[in-house]
Image: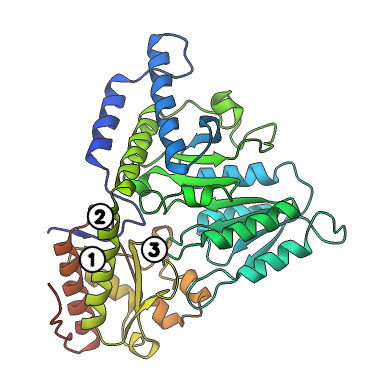
Amino acid sequence: MNELYFDNNATTPLDGVVLEALQGALAENYGNPSSRHPLGEKALAAVDRARRSLVQLVGANSPREIVFTSGGTESIHTAAHIALAEKPNGSVLMSSVEHAAVQRPLEAWSGRGMSLERIGVDEAGRLALDEVLVALAKNTLGQTQSRPIHLVSLLLANNETGVLLPVDDLEAIANGARQAGALVHLDAVQVPGKLPLQDWVDHADLISLSAHKFHGPKGVGALYVRSGLPTPAAGFLTGGPQEEERRAGTLNVPGIVGMGVAADRALEHLADVPARVRLRELRDRLETGLLARIPGLRIHASGAERLPNTSNVGLTEADAKGVDGELLHLSLAAEGLCVSGGSACSAHTQKPSDVLLAMGIPEDEARASLRFSLSRMTRPEEVDRAVEITARTISGLMGFSPTADSNRS
């Protein structure tokens, strides 16, 4: 069976150029970058090259602002550690649609004396900006009767719906956070290679990244830490003095090399304007085809600014009652179509998406929703085939004939 892969927000295929670099580093660049001999110096040089590539990808000012980690989850934990480890009891703000990799670490901090406030979203999944600004205004460090806010942690792009945090909104939040003495962390793992991170970096103190979300290897990530930011005396992972004592442990040289090359490739794609337009056009082609062939379908978060590769679709509540969400996903998988119902991390829970529920979408509709996420490797014929399989599968489950799409090319 030739599988159709539309789950790129869960993970992306390894870029061929990245694979070559990774294999070369595994075979030849096996020195420890902390060792003071030629093989160690060679490994250190490879890490430095990758760090400079991440500087370009993020739009950072210095290689010292990049800390390599084991992935997005560790980067998020480290960001929380930097913001909260040496602070008195206070509070943390995050949205109600954060990934579990953000929610659970911050919930753990709430058990250590920090209060946790969740900010809602509207029906399109857009952050309630006014709620954030009001919370920051009420909790400035100068107001001794309020618990000071130490951290605002937000998704830059939602992994399930693709909804983006607009630059203007982030700028307003950053200004409010500075007045309150709080740091701003962005979970940006979905953005590299799809949109330029440079548009947001000036308004963030900490940014989490993961290589496998932009055609790099799994098991390696990075954290942007703004220059001049006070950091705890001990890192989140303690031990050796690696990463200027901000993250202990022998560096994963092959993974870091792969992440650096993946960053270079992502920048090449972003510089190719026709290729960027093509990705959005393929997403729109998918949505147009599905809407034309499946009665009662709607695009979640269509009224918000979204990533150009992400589409979350669902049947209206009345239609969704006739579709078993788990059976829908299993039926599509049996046809070789790889999609998801939301975050890959919660794919086996059989629960409706918390993100969709937070947007006010009924439970039955949320259960029968599908997330399609494309990549720069997706081809037009794959999009058309995905539309055909999805329409045929849903029609079979609901007992109607899919509408003929006379506009497909």
Residue in view at x 48 percent, y 25 percent: 250
Query: Is 239 drawn above or below residue 391 in the view shown?
Result: above
Observer-side mark, 2 or 3, equals 2
Work out whether residue 144 or residue 348 is closer to the camera in this orientation and state it.
Answer: 144
Give the percent coordinates (x, y) of residue 102: 55, 55
Question: Which residue is disc 2 drawn over?
Answer: 274
Given the image, on which type of amino acid does mark 1 rest? Ala
Can residue 103 be seen in the rendering of this structure? no
Where is mark 3, residue-wise?
Answer: 348
Residue in front for this viewpoint, 282 or 19: 282
- Name the foreground residue: 78 vs 57: 57
**SS for callout 2:** helix
Residue 128 versus residue 338 in the image, above or below:
below
Work out whether mark 2 precedes mark 1 in sequence or the reverse, and give the earlier one: 2
Instruction: List x then y, in percent, for residue 398.
Output: 24, 87
| Residue at figure coordinates x 42%, y 57% from the top left | 345
Distance between mark 1 and mark 3 Cα atoms: 14 Å
Q: Earlier in the sequence, mark 1 or mark 3?
A: 1
Q: Does residue 324 lie above or below 31 as drawn?
A: below
Q: Residues within 10 Å of mark 1 (few under 14, many from 20)?
A: some
Query: In whole angstroms, how far apart are the C-alphas of marks 2 and 1?
Result: 32 Å
Which type of secondary structure does the marked residue at label 3 adopt?
loop
* Residue holding disc 1: 333
Examine the image and state in which quarter residue 380 appears. Answer: bottom left
Is residue 31 in view from this perspective?
A: yes
Residue 231 picture location, percent across and down: 67, 36
Q: Which mark is residue 217?
A: none
Inspect the image, locate mark 3, and give the three-letter code of the amino acid beneath it: His
Amino acid on which the number 2 mark rests in the picture: Pro
